[in-house]
Image: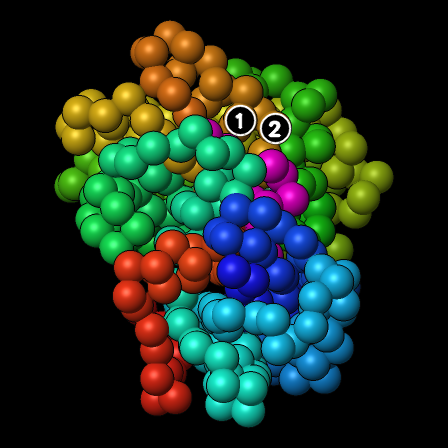
Amino acid sequence: MYILGIETSCDETAASVVKDGRRILSNSIASSLSLHKRYWGVVPEIAFRMQLETITQIANSAIKEARIDLKDVGLISVTNGPGLLGSLLVGISFAKSASLGLGIPLLGINHLYSHIYASFLENSHVSLPFVSLVVSGGHTSLFYLKDFDKIQLLGSTQDDACGEAFDKVAKILGLGYPGGPLIERLSKNGNPRKIRLGCSKTENPLDFSFSGIKTAVLYYVRKMTQNSKLPAYPAGRQTPCLSGRQANSKLIRDIAASFQETVIDTLIKKSVLACKLKNTKRLVVGGGVAANSRLREKFYEIAREKGLTIYFPSKKLCTDNAAMVAGLGYQLFKKGYISGLDLNADLN
Ligand code: KG4
Ligand code: ZN
């Protein structure tokens, strides 16, 4: 069975054809990222205007690349939340009209659950039940999955999402947007033990909090600037911002590495605890931050130490894509799930 997946929850316009929930035949993505960079974050209006312009073309290119015909599609699977309202509505409206016009069944998919499914696209050995950590720009959550429709939320962030914290710290350091890949790159030549940072404690040990560490970095940068250890920020900026040349300083690399290491250690500690509490040895990680090489390396290390089996999608499937939406759609459709034309965006 061929499934057409559509994903427009944030700045990407993505479409993919997946066969039988596993085999990716095409994975087309257009991103408006370059238009958001100057604003240091995604501007919803810019994102959904571009999605409106590109959705048809991207869906067509996914069908063409898969070398199938639209009439061969057995299911249209579309992200219906959480995400940006205008962006979600572009994908949902397109999927609904294609479903009605072509008589193809329709299914709305939760974005976070599709990030979990990304590991299943490339690995046929993952078996249920397992604990899953989703670390993205908008969410940081731990789940326990007995099945694709039996998902228990164990904990989530109480303030900033993990990717959001990477983006904000990169802004404080004047690196650019999105911050995750930039912090990862700088950290390679930084000392992760140079600055003592910590993530705030949470009442539920499986919840997360990242706004404290972000503020700690901000205060540290301010102090270093006052002590002339870092250059002053350009006038007129609300956030301290260093130029590219200054960002290459040793101190900036050490701050980036210390921040990254502390965040990764927290993610590991809580994921291992969740596995222990749920009595499972399987851990599936997904979402944009899971593309981070240091994070992957450290999770594999702890997995060896604790006897856990850990699954990551390839880096390309960590960030937003429609293959994971098509794949999860297939699994749920097989269980009898289907959406009507009243499918709407679900922001929760
Ligand atoms: O999953 P995703 O593509 O979109 C959302 O659903 O939010 O995640 C985007 C987030 C951004 O915050 C970005 O900075 C972060 O993932 N990210 C990374 C890396 N690549 C992307 N964070 C750390 N290291 C990376 N290599
Ligand atoms: Zn995502």
Mark linked to residue 172: none
Taking 291 as reference, is 119 left or right? left
Give coordinates of residue 297: x percent, y percent.
Answer: 54, 20
The front one of 262 and 195 is 262
Q: Is residue 216 visible?
A: no
Q: Identify the magenta region.
A: 311-323
The three-letter amino acid code for the residue at tag 2 is Ser
Give coordinates of residue 146: x percent, y percent.
Answer: 22, 42
Secondary structure beneath disc 2? Answer: helix
Taking 273 as reference, is 190 left or right? right
The residue that disc 2 covers is 293
Give coordinates of residue 321: x percent, y percent.
Answer: 59, 57
The front one of 263 and 250 is 263
Instruction: Determine crowd level at label 2: few under 14, some 14-19, many 20+ residues with C-alpha closer than 10 A.
Output: some
Q: Is residue 248 above or below residue 189?
A: below
Does the segment drawn in magenta span residue 312? yes
The colour style of the image is rainbow
Rendered-image quadrant of the C terminus: bottom left
The three-letter amino acid code for the residue at tag 1 is Arg
Q: Is residue 104 above or below residue 229?
A: below
Looking at the image, which residue is at 45% across and 22% down?
299
Q: Is residue 220 above or below residue 155?
A: above
Q: Is mark 2 within 8 Å of ligand 1?
A: yes
How far is disc 2 from disc 1 in space, using C-alphas? 5 Å
Mark linked to residue 296: 1
Give coordinates of residue 216: x percent, y percent.
Answer: 44, 39
Does the segment drawn in magenta span residue 19? no
Q: Residue furthest right?
A: 245
Count every numbered label the image shows and give the total. 2
Taking 330 as reference, is 346 left or right? left
Secondary structure beneath disc 1? Answer: helix
Looking at the image, which residue is at 71% across and 21% down?
189
